[in-house]
Image (tube, rainbow, N blue to C red):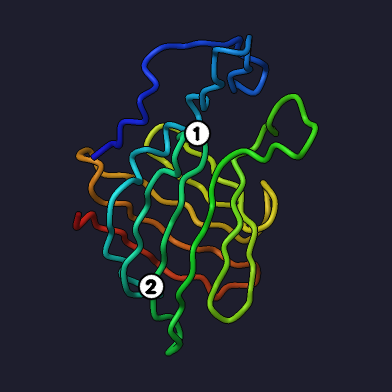
Amino acid sequence: MAENTGNTENTGNTGSTGSTQDTGPTQAPRPDERVRALDRLVGTWRVTGGAEGTVAYRWMEGGFFLVQDVELEQYGQRVTGFEVIGREKPFGAERPGEDIRSRFYDSRGNTFDYVYELDGDTLTIWAGEKGSPAYFRGTFDAAGDTLSGAWVYPGGGGYDSVMTRIG
């Protein structure tokens, strides 16, 4: 299930965000544990509920960013795109940001921003910013092969969603 990134030992100092800093010219930074906890998403999933289709998660080389490829149908419309998930580290910043953020790009030219939180077996994906009234919250089963939850929208209109691992 998990992809090996080749990183097997801690080579840097851990900052307040849990991310690792480069401590010298021969030691590369490593992704932190909160980002790597999303490894349980790696693989291909069948999505059912208010949106139907498949999504596939894979690590970008280096293991700092998780990429999701999306092929769904929702409200009678085809939705294809990709999402990049990880910590933002703008040019010149010494440390990445606290939140695990993402941006989704679709084939219609839309972009959507999210914040990911994984607490035990519960995944929350906030639309826009953490604490937003629009979010997904789901729970992994004991085997980690099903994620069941719902998208919640302010004023109603959300939907149930189940992801089942198929590869």
Indicate the amino acid at tag 2: Glu
- Relative placement, left or right, of 18 versus 120 is right
Question: Which mark identifies residue 35?
Answer: 1
Q: Residue at x 51, y 42 (%)?
A: 65
Measure how far apart labels 1 and 2 are at the Cα level: 24 Å
Amino acid of disc 1: Val
Question: On the image, numbered disc 2 is attached to which residue?
Answer: 71
Q: Residues within 10 Å of mark 2 (few under 14, many from 20)?
A: some
Q: Nearer the viewer, residue 104 or 137?
A: 104
Which structural element holds mark 1? helix
Q: Quadrant of the C terminus?
A: bottom left
Q: Is residue 164 above or below residue 121?
A: below
Q: In the drawing, what numbered circle is on residue 2?
A: none
Q: Is residue 120 left or right of residue 30?
A: left
Say which of 22 and 43 sits in front: 22
Residue at image point 28% right, 59% down: 45
Residue at point 50% right, 33% down? Answer: 35
Quadrant housing residue 78 = bottom left
Between discs 1 and 2, the one toward the N terminus: 1
Q: Are marks 1 and 2 in contact (CB under 8 Å)?
A: no
| Residue 100 location (% of width, % of height) | 59, 40
Residue 148: x and y, percent? 33, 55
